[in-house]
Image (cartoon, rainbow, N blue to C red):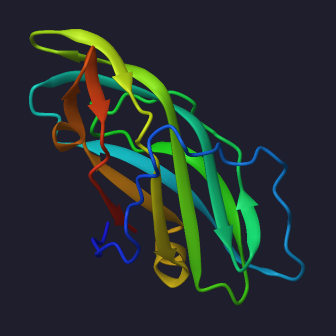
Amino acid sequence: MKTVHVIAAIAILGCGRHTAVSQVESVAPPGNLAGTAHLLLLGTDPAGVISARPRIKSVEVRGGGWLLANAVVTPQLELTETGQAWTLTDFGIPEGVTEVQFHVIFDGGSYDLQSESGDLDTTCADIQLTGQVARILERGHAVIQLDIEGSLAPAAGGMKLVPQVVLQY
């Protein structure tokens, strides 16, 4: 995988104020597709984290003004399996589209550390990234790499997910 810097900022939406990604069927844009791709999520650097199991509430891929995908392929992940990049969704890319926007919303989860276990607070853990279509088409995927140790922060009653991510192709 080639590492690139994230062109779009990760957006953590206002806590408790964000709305869920729409759950309508994907709309196929007119014309031909430049290709198809997968959006994957990979946990990295678990350090002292034994297990981190977030649930995926919704995933949305948009490009060229079109909703390209919103079906969640893998609703629960085990991020400490660092050799496993989990498929979040699959999408087609219309010809002429140069960038796609990814929006991932989590829905709670759980964690295990050496000293404690508990619920994972994901209320402010949305991820929004922009990917370059030319780079995505090189290998047929975009991979969100989430730094596990850097993304878990102590919170009242457990741990909070504050995603620290890099987009790779």
Instruction: From the viewer's side, name the closer residue of 146 and 158.
Output: 158
**Measured from the top left, where is residue 60 in percent x and y?**
64, 54
Quadrant where the C terminus is found in the figure:
bottom left
Quadrant where the N terminus is found in the figure:
bottom left
Horizontal arrangement in the rendering, residue 108 relative to residue 95 (left or right)? left
Q: Quadrant of residue 45?
A: top left
Instruction: From the viewer's side, name the closer residue of 127 and 70.
Output: 127
Q: Quadrant of residue 148?
A: top left
Above or below residue 54? Residue 88 is below
Q: Residue at x 24, y 41 (%)?
A: 151
**Measured from the top left, where is residue 70 in percent x and y?**
70, 50
**Measured from the top left, where is residue 109 in percent x and y?**
43, 22
Above or below residue 33? Residue 107 is above
**Measured from the top left, where is residue 146 in percent x and y?**
30, 48
User: Outermost residue, bottom direction?
Assistant: 96
Above or below residue 35? Residue 116 is above
How many numbered circles are shown? 0
Q: Residue at x 74, y 76 (%)?
A: 65
Q: Residue at x 23, y 34 (%)?
A: 152
Horizontal arrangement in the rendering, residue 8 relative to residue 104 (left or right)? left
Q: Residue at x 44, y 34 (%)?
A: 123
Horizontal arrangement in the rendering, residue 145 relative to residue 67 (left or right)? left
